[in-house]
Image (cartoon, grey):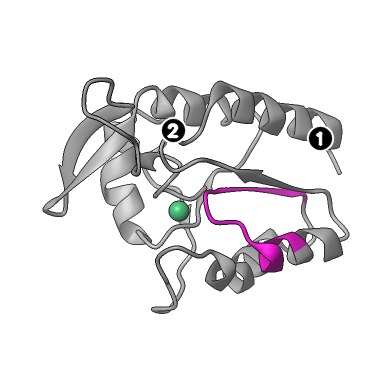
Amino acid sequence: MDVDGVISLFGFQGALALPGAFHTIDGIPHCIGHDSGGRVKRLHEAFEMVWATGWEEKANEYLPLLLDLPERDYHVLSFDGRATWGSAHWKLDAIDEYAGSRPAAWVDDNLDEECEGWAARREAPTLLVRTEPATGISDEHVERLLDFARRHAGT
Ligand SMILES: [Mg+2]
């Protein structure tokens, strides 16, 4: 699960109908999407949730409490300083290593051709879910994820 563009939103127009509420995280204001917590929570019954974000450890520091998630200490992928704003391919090695031969779903606003190539090459079932950074994770994304999990449970 990525954070920027999925849970922390940006690029939306106007201030009258904000898609979330602003929270100061590490001194920086972030617009945390309305009900992004509820949506991530719905995935818990079917998935092991893992942070795949440039936030790294900060994701656990702030988000489980802020989003009222059922756990406080999720696995965090680390990227050894490779994080680059506006792209996601630098996450591939860490995601690939952690997923191993298991089915995997990746939610991110920056999935590019490299990510698609990786998903296509995997032997295990793989789902890429691309979000819009202005709206983030939606109910429709959650339904797609749960459907993927149902189809591949036990594989
Ligand atoms: Mg992102």
Separation of residues labelled 1 and 2 (CA atoms): 29 Å
The answer to whether residue 140 is left or right of residue 63 is: right
Residue 31 position within the rendered picture, expressed as x and y whole percent measured from the top left: 27, 37
Please give the residue where the numbered disc 2 appears in the rendered image. 135
From the image, state whether disc 1 or disc 2 is nearer to you.
Answer: 2
Question: Residue extending furthest left?
Answer: 27
Q: Which mark is residue 108?
A: none
Q: Is residue 146 above or below residue 121?
A: above
**Mark positioned earlier in the residue sequence (1 or 2):** 2
Residue 146 counted in the magenta span: no
Frontmost residue, 116 versus 81: 116
Q: Is residue 139 above or below residue 14?
A: above
Identify residue type, mark 2: Thr
The answer to whether residue 21 is left or right of residue 145 is: left
Residue 113 position within the rendered picture, expressed as x and y whole percent measured from the top left: 70, 64
Frontmost residue, 107 versus 38: 107
Residue at (28, 20) in percent of width and height: 17
Residue 47 position within the rendered picture, expressed as x and y whole percent measured from the top left: 63, 38
The quarter holding residue 96 reads bottom right
Which segment is the magenta one? 103-116
Q: Does dot 2 land on a helix, a strand or a loop?
A: loop
The answer to whether residue 101 is left or right of residue 1 is: right
The quarter holding residue 46 reads top right
Residue 132 position within the rendered picture, expressed as x and y whole percent measured from the top left: 50, 40
Question: Residue extending furthest front?
Answer: 14
Q: Which mark is residue 153?
A: 1
Identify residue type, mark 1: Ala
Q: Is residue 108 above or below residue 21?
A: below
Residue 112 counted in the magenta span: yes
Q: Is residue 137 above or below residue 55?
A: above
Graded by Cα atoms within 10 Å as few (under 14), some (14 to 19) or many (20 or more), the crowding at tag 2 reads many
Residue at (44, 78) in percent of width and height: 82
